[in-house]
Amino acid sequence: MRRVLGRSARAPRRTGLLLVATLTQALWMAGPASAMDTAPSTDLPDLSESRAALYAGDYDRALALLMPLTATVRHADLYNLLGFANRSLKRYDEAARWYKEALFYDPAHRPALEYQGELFIAVGDFRRAEKNLELLRLLCHPTGCEEQEKLRKALVAADRKPGT
């Protein structure tokens, strides 16, 4: 009787291993197709004209240049710039949407974490801004980084002592 139980217990294990192998093969075969959904950095179009418009404070022009790209480009840098332009125009809900999108594609995107933190400060959500600062602290450890310092200064300017 022990052998019968041993054999019946093995059958589900073999089936499970076969299922894992089949799923692994299916994912491996689908890998290149799904990777096409997210443009790597090298596939990002030249954003210099959009950036120039942002630096000049012409946020509407920047949006006019950036928005059409969303039809074909999926990239954290693009979404971060869209968030920045919208935040600068005080379109906070739209900015939040684009920062969320940027962080979906790259959860460690330091500029998006900084700018999203500044958005949180603008809407009075200091707790979430401080969480972004903590994420930047971890990402930039041990030497720190520009994004971390800018968000820390923004919190201080808003009369918030980071970490309190």
Image: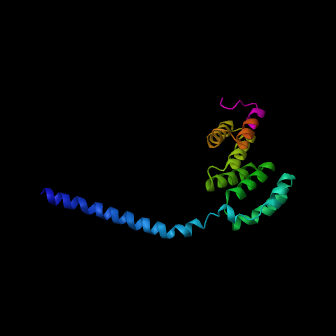
Above or below, 91 against 164 in this view is below
Predominant secondary structure, magenta span: loop
Q: Dividing the picture into quarters, in which one does residue 71 lie? A: bottom right
Q: How many marks?
A: 0
Picture residue at 84% right of the left edge, 52% below the top: 55
Left or right, 26 with reference to 159: left
Left or right, 43 with reference to 6: right
Q: Which residues are magenta?
A: 154-164
| Residue 155 inside the magenta-drawn segment | yes
Picture residue at 20% right of the left edge, 61% below the top: 7
> Where residue 80 sits in the image (x, y, percent)?
72, 53
Picture residue at 63% right of the left edge, 49% below the top: 108
Q: Residue furthest left?
A: 1
| Residue 86 inside the magenta-drawn segment | no
Q: Dividing the picture into quarters, in which one does residue 60 lie? A: bottom right
Work out whether residue 82 or residue 13 is closer to the camera in this orientation and state it. Answer: 13
Quadrant where the N terminus is found in the figure: bottom left
> Where residue 5 sits in the image (x, y, percent)?
18, 58
> Where residue 95 sits in the image (x, y, percent)?
73, 51
Left or right, 70 with reference to 61: left
Q: How is the image coloured?
A: rainbow
> Where residue 8 sits in the image (x, y, percent)?
21, 61
Picture residue at 33% right of the left edge, 62% below the top: 16
Left or right, 28 with reference to 141: left
Quadrant where the C terminus is found in the figure: top right
